Amino acid sequence: MIIQLQKNQNFNFFLFSLLIFSLYSCNEDLNLEENIYYNVSISIEGQGSVSTLEGSYQKNDTILFEAISNTGYYFDRWEGFDSDIKNETYQHVLKSNISIRAYFLPIPEVSDNIKLFIPKEIDPNPIFIIENGGSSAYLTSKTGEYLKTWNFDSKLGNDLELLSDGSVVGLFKPDQVSFSFGGYGGILKKFNPLGSLDWEYEINNENELAHHDFEIMPNGNILILVWERFSESQAIEMGFNGSEDIFLEKIIEFSPQERSIIWEWKSSDHLIQDFNPTGLNYGVVSEHPEKIDLNYYDYENGDLMHANGLYYDDIKDVIYVSVNFYSEIWVVPHKYDTDTTKTDLGDLSFRFGNPRTYKGEGERLFFNNHHPSLVTLDNKTLNHFLIYMNGTKEKQSIVYEFELPSEFDINPLNWGTPNIYWSYSNPEIYNAKISGVYRLPNGNTLICEGDFGYWEVTKDSKVVWKYEGNGTFWRGYVYPNMQ
């Protein structure tokens, strides 16, 4: 027992000594840490200064870097940290020697059209500006400089798109038409980069007229909106509650190679009405959201629907249609051939914006709308959908970004309003007609206020650019890397 006790005492003494040594060593390490210094070097590109002084700083010091621009310059970025930093002030915990460079760039001169210009936060790509119903378009820099101008002999009606090779495809107004409403076109034309006409295709006769918008598909074919006339007697037979000719929407797919129509979808094949029990298409409107109520909107000139935009989704193989007088979006299936599309399989795959169109419950969000498009920046924005809601009820326009379902429910009675992911409104933005919205490559949003010009806002709803055009405008497109 005595020997065992001595062993324990010796062992305890050993542990005590080890503890004292460890504490001493840790204290020495802490002292060494406190005596470690790193060098901070700072250089400047452009005209400006940095408030932080160069020199040696102790390890783990928190250093505040602040960039101060000279007159006529703006701070662009810091380089030398783990990543480029855009903020003028930045706190950094010192862990090693660092060499920092502050970049100051000259503030560009801008034209009188530019009412707001925050260069560091805007998307740098030029805007393809289209005169509404005019005969010109412009590729315009963010400083307001016209990089290229297109002037045409005919007036636009309305859409125009710039291709990667510098060609343009546009919808133009013919010299004569049998009928017309706002936004009418009639002739689709393609001009090569030299301005010569490559081809044209006319949809303009007594019973049909192309109008407003077209969409170039990945395979090169072109979807086009078309008004289709039905006589008064035909309309009454269909269950219409008025007494005039009516003009309904259809979508055609045109092949430029074949110079012919290879597919079409007609709204007249997918109607419902509860006005005339003996007429065609009679049924209970609220039980069939997939059908289109012929009598939802009665306008005395017979233009009942007035679609004004379309966008093709090649993943789902559907077409999103902005229907202005119904104040909603129709989702039209494209996967069937023309004959099958005439059947119930060609009914709407989805719709949203205004449940009143099928006598449904729920909030009505849209009061006239323009320019449907998908956001295609990255996987995070997959199925995100943009629309400009004109806001004719409250005289306030709103831009909406929705999260659409990855698949549309096959039971129309389960349809509802998609989740609103983001929205933007401003007391100064309102136009009852035209207008549009486009997601820019840097994540900002370009808004076309049809009777003013263009706004650019960040995801945090900060306005960073405004262009006043002194006219009226049909949307605005961006083509990255095209100067």
Image (cartoon, grey):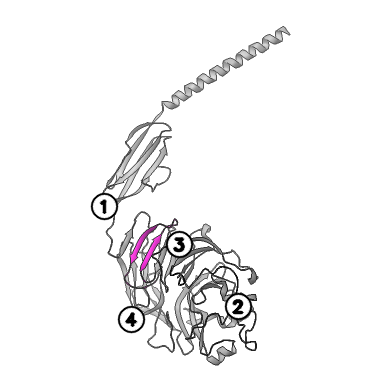
90 vs 419: above or below: above
Please report the residue visible at 61 percent of the width from the left and 65 percent of the height from the top: 407
The residue beneath circle 4 is 153
What is the crowding at mark 4: few (fewer than 14 residues within 10 Å), some, or many (at least 20)?
A: few
Query: Decide: marks 2, 4 in contact (CB < 8 A)?
Result: no
Of 457 and 26, which appears nearest the observer? 457
Q: Amino acid at mark 1?
A: Gly
Query: Decide: marks 4, 1 in contact (CB < 8 A)?
Result: no
The numbered mark, 2 or 1, whose residue comes first in the sequence reads 1
The numbered mark, 3 or 4, whose residue comes first in the sequence reads 4
Q: Alpha carbon of mark 2 to alpha carbon of mark 4: how far? A: 41 Å
* Image quarter of the N terminus: top right
Q: Alpha carbon of mark 2 to alpha carbon of mark 3: how far? A: 31 Å
Please identify the residue farthest to the bottom as the structure is shown.
233
Residue 323 locus on image (x, y percent): 50, 75
Query: Decide: marks 1, 3 in contact (CB < 8 A)?
Result: no
The residue beneath circle 2 is 291
Answer yes or no: is residue 80 visible: no
Q: Nearer the viewer, mark 2 or mark 4?
A: 2
Q: Magenta residues?
A: 451-474
Please identify the residue farthest to the right as the structure is shown.
1
Q: Amino acid at mark 4?
A: Asp
The residue beneath circle 1 is 72
Q: Amino acid at mark 3?
A: Tyr
Of 181 and 197, which appears nearest the observer? 181
Query: Decide: marks 2, 1 in contact (CB < 8 A)?
Result: no
- For mark 2, give the secondary structure: loop
Residue 455: say if magenta.
yes
